[in-house]
Amino acid sequence: MAAGAVISDPVTNAGGPSRDYATLLPWWDMRAHAVDDYRAGGLAAGVMSVRLDYPVLEQAARDGRDIVVFADLQGGVHRSTDTGAVIFAGSRQHPFNLWVPNADSDVAEGIVRLVNLRYAGRGKGYVYVRGAASLYRDRPQIVLTEATQLSDFR
């Protein structure tokens, strides 16, 4: 910033698209509080991070253990089919998905609606996901059968 480079360069930013900081700052603050909560107690409580605990997450999926994962659902529901919906909760380096079976059921529709309204886009993003870990095509996942598997709190 002191050098006036890139984002701080008035010439670079003149007349171009700008960010709506009045909207973004509260959103960034809310996300920062979620990460702080995870760091303050989630780590000690055994909550897994997709990125930080990926090998442990993979092993839990191989073992079929019940786990809690701190994940970012900002991308929302990636794909819906007649049989269910896929929610990406990881990254290319750390693939981890949530699967919502029975797409046309009231429960599945409620889970998809919750993700899209509460966590996707400029929603909260971060969520604690509870459930039995399993593997699908050698990638860890949790199958969501109840909306209560998603929570803002540990």
Image (cartoon, grey):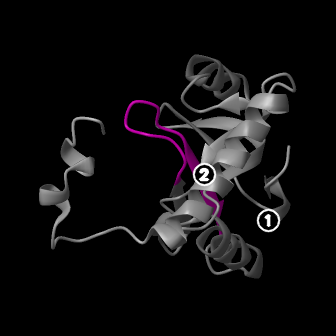
Evaluate whether residue 9 shows in this view. yes
Which amino acid type is shown beneath numbered disc 1?
Ala
Position in image of residue 113 (x %, y %): 65, 77
- Residue shown at 63% from the left, 72% from the top: 112
Question: Which element is circle 2 on?
Answer: strand
- Cα separation, mark 2 vs mark 1, equals 12 Å
Evaluate whether residue 121 shows in this view. no
Q: In the displayed structure, would residue 97 be above or below residue 42?
A: below
- Residue shown at 79% from the left, 65% from the top: 147
Q: Nearer the viewer, residue 17 or 93?
A: 17
Which amino acid type is shown beneath numbered disc 2?
Leu
First to last magenta residue range: 88-102
Q: Nearer the viewer, residue 25 or 106?
A: 25
How packed mark 2 is, by other alpha carbons closer than 10 Å (few <14, some 14-19, many 20 or more), is: many
Question: Which element is circle 1 on?
Answer: helix
Please give left or right for residue 134 compared with residue 45 in the image: left
Question: Which secondary structure dominates the residues rendered in magenta?
Answer: loop
Quadrant where the image shows the N terminus: top left
* 98 part of magenta stretch: yes
- Residue shown at 70% from the left, 36% from the top: 133
Q: In the displayed structure, would residue 48 be above or below residue 124?
A: above
Q: In this view, which residue lies farthest toward the left?
A: 11
Please give left or right for residue 85 compared with residue 115 in the image: left
How packed mark 1 is, by other alpha carbons closer than 10 Å (few <14, some 14-19, many 20 or more), is: some
Location of residue 16 by image quarter: bottom left
Q: In the displayed structure, would residue 144 be above or below residue 105?
A: above
User: Label 1 belongs to which residue?
Assistant: 147
Location of residue 110 by image quarter: bottom right
Q: In the displayed structure, would residue 30 be above or below residue 6?
A: below
Disc number placed over residue 98 in the picture, else none: 2
